[in-house]
């Protein structure tokens, strides 16, 4: 019996040691904060239709001014991971492609949430065409091949960033920039304009070297005339070049709520000079941001698709005909498919480390949506990403819709009036729910 008791004591002690080991491992996993970054070239290899200006119709591209990139940063906080991807295209990929990307990065890298957003450059390729009758097959096979190239490029950038994960430090900062953007829509004072430049710096924990600089600013990349049929990132590429030369690491640009906001290039020059000036402003802000170790890493997420009535009857053949003349039939057909049963935008939210909010929306939101959400959110930092995880046209404010004009009328803003406000109210509720300040309730728009 004594022998048995000794064996029992040894076994119990072993179990205790193993349990302590598991507990220690679990505690260490909870304290993990890592980041990695990468980029891939997503410039089309063949001539394809250009995105952004209706007067181009189906005319094909004829070269490249500067390469188009997918720039990615992956963040692991505790056991969870997220990917943030900036694209030098007009919008994010179509729904089917987004789902394949999400499934692939979840399976291969355990990434649970992604913000995949276009910069909204108007000198990028059309990405909506597909291998279906009347949707591109036969006439635009090169564009169909490009959609596959874009999907693979995004996946490659994310997986490469994940492979580069290393222990990291984090810092955020903001500054208000004058004479960099303007409201192109409203004529009624006070005219709103989101002048906030927001920055996230991720540096290596061991030597402080830059991993990535995430830039969030609001200005339509429409610097290059519509008669240019060459691919360009517009001002974004020049901005990234300045940042990466000075700070090192990967620069990632995420467009804000720029539905009614354009660049103000007057004091700066062409798109290259403007991008360089914006890059220098980022560098100046970065000098005031000191990345620090994260004490309690965490990522909490929420994502839903909403459903709103459409102000435009996309099933009406006359309406389809008008749009087809303004653009071209195959492109319009893809939007008819997407919008005929109502407008279904997506909103994605991540709460990083309890006090940094990231909000992605699948459309061109007017700037007041982002401004008001930041004012009410009561967090350390809030990054607002437009053109993210889908594309559902313009979302004017209620007062913007009442004023009317391009970006606010039903032809390009088909979602029912007030859709943007409803989504922003939901975003605010989600944020407080993720912080544990409100009980979770079903999304109002789902």
Image (cartoon, grey):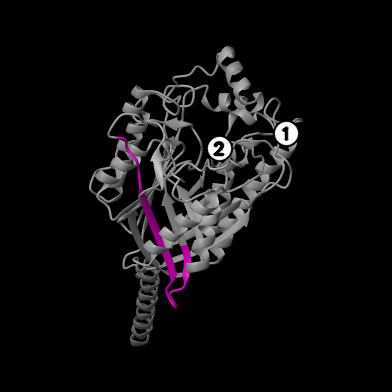
| Residue under label 2 | 95
Q: Label for residue 140?
A: 1
Q: Residue 374 location, x and y as percent? A: 29, 46
Image x and y of residue 437, in percent: 23, 48
Q: Is residue 164 above or below residue 72?
A: below
Circle 1 SS class: loop
Q: Given the current orientation, which residue lies at the most extreme left position? A: 437
Instruction: Nearest to the eye among marks 1 and 2: give it.
Output: 1
Q: Which residues are magenta?
A: 191-212
Quadrant placement of the C terminus: top left
**Label 1 environment density (alpha carbons within 10 Å; few <14, some 14–19, many ≥20):** many
Q: Residue at x 26, y 45 (%)?
A: 375
303 relative position to 58: left or right: left
Task: Name the quadrant containing residue 182.
Answer: top left
Q: Position of residue 56 (x, y in %)?
A: 64, 31
Give the answer, above or below, for where 352 lies relative to 181: below
Write down the quadrant of residue 289 in the picture: bottom left
Specify whether 58 is left or right of 83.
Answer: right
User: In the image, 223: left or right of 299?
Assistant: right
Q: Residue furthest right?
A: 138
Q: Nearer the viewer, residue 25 or 372?
A: 372
Figure quadrant of the N terminus: bottom left
Is residue 329 visible in the rendered image? The answer is yes
Q: Is residue 187 above or below residue 268?
A: above
Instruction: Specify whether residue 167 is painted magenta.
Output: no
Tell me how far mark 1 sits from mark 2, CA to CA. 19 Å
Asked whether residue 198 is drawn in magenta, I would say yes
Nearest to N terminus: mark 1 or mark 2: 2
Q: Give the percent coordinates (x, y) of residue 418.
A: 34, 27
From the viewer's perspective, tell me whether residue 346 is left or right of residue 61.
Answer: left
């Amino acid at each position: 019996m004594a022998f048995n008791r000794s064996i029992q004591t040894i076994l119990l002690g072993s179990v205790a040691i193993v349990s302590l080991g598991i507990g220690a491992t679990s505690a260490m996993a909870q304290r993990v904060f890592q980041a990695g970054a990468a980029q891939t070239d997503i410039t089309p290899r063949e001539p394809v239709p250009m995105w952004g200006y209706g007067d181009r119709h189906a005319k094909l591209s004829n070269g490249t001014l500067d390469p188009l990139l997918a720039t990615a940063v992956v963040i692991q906080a505790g056991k969870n991971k997220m990917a943030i991807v900036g694209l030098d295209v007009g919008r994010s990929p179509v729904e089917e492609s987004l789902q394949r990307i999400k499934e692939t990065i979840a399976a291969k890298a355990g990434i649970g949430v992604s913000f995949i957003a276009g910069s909204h450059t108007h000198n990028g390729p059309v990405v909506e065409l597909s291998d279906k009758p009347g949707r591109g097959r036969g006439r635009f096979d090169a564009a169909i091949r490009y959609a596959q190239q874009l999907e693979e490029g995004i996946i490659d950038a994310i997986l490469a960033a994940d492979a580069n994960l290393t222990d990291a430090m984090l810092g955020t900062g903001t500054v208000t920039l004058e004479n960099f953007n303007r409201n192109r829509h409203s004529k009624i004072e006070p005219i709103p304009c989101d002048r906030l430049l927001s920055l996230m710096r991720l540096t290596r924990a061991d030597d402080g070297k830059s991993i990535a600089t995430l830039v969030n600013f609001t200005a339509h990349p429409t610097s290059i005339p519509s008669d240019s049929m060459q691919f360009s990132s517009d001002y974004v590429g020049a901005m990234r070049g300045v940042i990466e030369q000075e700070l090192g690491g990967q620069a990632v640009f995420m467009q804000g709520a720029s539905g009614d906001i354009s660049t103000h290039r007057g004091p700066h020059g062409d798109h290259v000079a403007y991008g360089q000036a914006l890059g220098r402003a980022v560098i100046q802000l970065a000098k005031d941001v000191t990345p620090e170790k994260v004490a309690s890493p965490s990522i909490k997420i929420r994502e839903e698709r909403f459903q709103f009535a459409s102000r435009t009857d996309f099933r009406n053949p006359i309406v389809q005909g008008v749009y087809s003349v303004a653009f071209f039939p195959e492109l319009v057909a893809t939007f008819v498919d997407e919008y005929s049963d109502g407008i279904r935008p997506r909103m994605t939210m991540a709460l990083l480390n309890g006090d940094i909010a990231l909000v992605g929306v699948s459309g061109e939101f007017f700037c007041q949506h982002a401004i008001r959400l930041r004012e009410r959110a009561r967090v350390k930092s809030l990054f607002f990403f437009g053109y993210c995880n889908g594309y559902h046209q313009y979302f004017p404010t209620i007062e913007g819709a009442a004023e009317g004009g391009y970006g606010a009328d039903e032809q390009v803003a088909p979602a029912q009036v007030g859709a943007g406000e409803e989504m922003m109210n939901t975003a605010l509720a989600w944020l407080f729910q993720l912080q544990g300040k409100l009980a979770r309730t079903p999304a109002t728009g789902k």
